[in-house]
Amino acid sequence: MSQAEKVEMPRRQRYKPYPAYKDSGVEWLGEIPAHWEVKRLKLVTEHHVNASELRAIAPDAEVSFVPMEAVGEHGGLDLSRTKPLAHVANGFTYFRDGDVVVAKITPCFENGKGALANGLVNGIGFGTTELHVLRKTPAVVDRFLFYVTMSDAFRRLGAAEMYGAGGQKRVPESFIENLPHPLPPLPEQRAITAFLDGETARIDALVATNERLIELLQEQRTALITRAVTTGLDPNVPMKDSGVEWLGEIPTHWEVKRIKWAAQMVSGHTPDKKVESYWQGGDIPWVSLADTGHLREVDYIATTEVMTTSDGIAHSSAHILPAGTVIFSRDATIGLCAITGAGMAVSQHFIGWVCSPRLQPEYLLLVLRSMTQELERLTMGATVRTIGMPDVKSLAIPIPPLPEQEKIVRHVLEHRAQLDSLVAKIRDAIARLKELRTVLISAAVTGKIDVREEVA
């Protein structure tokens, strides 16, 4: 087995329970160690944190600024951003070193976004208003409090309490204040956090190793496609200069042509969004930026997030592209592509190539996916990224004879499937590691396992 095929998993270890338990009186919790107490979090934390203590700090002093994307899943803050205190003192959530911050909005809460704040600039942080802040009292260790917020029960019960409509549901402050949770004596809290620090670090290291394996396999996947569509499958074939910088040398019997000479290029369009009859009850698939996530994963697309109507097509510049059309995104995320599995239209953010009999759609798809660096070179704009139509029309590709195109496609798909199978296994291992991490934290902070001897 190669290094890239090794899926790292930890050895299973059995932890013993506590010597004696008692009924907690809390349905979701069940029994807890006999010497532990149950307290509502509001009794062991200062939840209503305000910034009045900052009056002694100069308004131009730099402090850490933490938007939601800087809050890690399962711990950690990206502290690369700072702002003057005067710029963030109003309209942002205040916290300081030692506070625990928890995302309140879906899906960030369910995904485990939260952290123990440490290393803040001047010990002070301001962040998104979508954070709850818990400040420890002398009754609780800050890292124990952090692990409580990382536990499965905390996240599951909090998600059940969310309020709001659609995608803007939030965990209420009352949930965090009133949650009953078991609390061991302070020395035991410290022992539990020391145990969890070590075990979660070990699990996180295994996750990082497996994520690196996925990166290596994906690099191998890209190299497989690029090599096949630019040099062919015969290592002994005579080569010639393609005359195209990104291509380099290609087999002497191959041609180089602009795509527009080997396929009919069709630009996309959006029917008027204000006209109800163009969209309500639509049954014509219409590829838009809403399909970006799907296009990252598939070779063929037959269904879309948004559908238009025949009325919308008739009263706009949109066209129904035939099945087998290669579609290509030229805005936002550049170069996402797939083959249509049915007749469908595309928005103005996409173009379609209807291949001539001399160009197999699957081969064109693979070539486009090997052109990442060339597409990046042609991309314009910092905020709204796009490739101009003149550059799209100038794109040139290698074109081998049709039988060779078909052979290349079969070769790539076969070997790519093997790599994808390995990636799927490693992703499954990562999911199990993350599940183990959550289970271990939950078991330790609720007293289901006794880890005191592990630390000793």
Image (cartoon, helix red, strand yellow):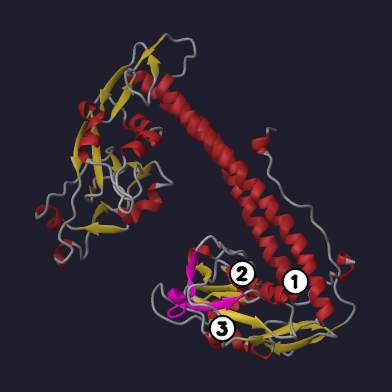
User: Would residue 358 be visible to someone looking at this image?
Assistant: no
Find disc 2 in the rendering and name its residue.
115
Instruction: Confirm whether the magenta stretch covers residue 251.
Output: no
* Whether residue 205 is visible: yes
Question: Residue 13, position in %: x, y?
Answer: 82, 59
The residue drawn where x is 25% and y is 58% is 307
**Local secondary structure at mark 3:** loop
Q: Residue at x 33, y 15 (%)?
A: 254
> Real-space Cα distance between discs 3 and 2?
26 Å
Tag 2 secondary structure: strand
Nearest-to-viewer mark from 2 and 1: 2
Residue drawn at (68%, 44%), measured in percent from left and top?
7
Residue 99 occupies which quadrant of the picture?
bottom right
Q: Is residue 35 above or below residue 385?
A: below
Q: In screen coordinates, is 218 left or right of 30?
A: left
The magenta stretch spans which residues?
82-96
The amino acid pointed to by label 3 is Ala
Cα separation between marks 2 and 1: 19 Å
Mark 3 = which residue?
A: 56
* Direction left: furthest residue: 315
Residue 443: assigned label: 1
**Quadrant of the rendered structure where residue 14 is?**
bottom right
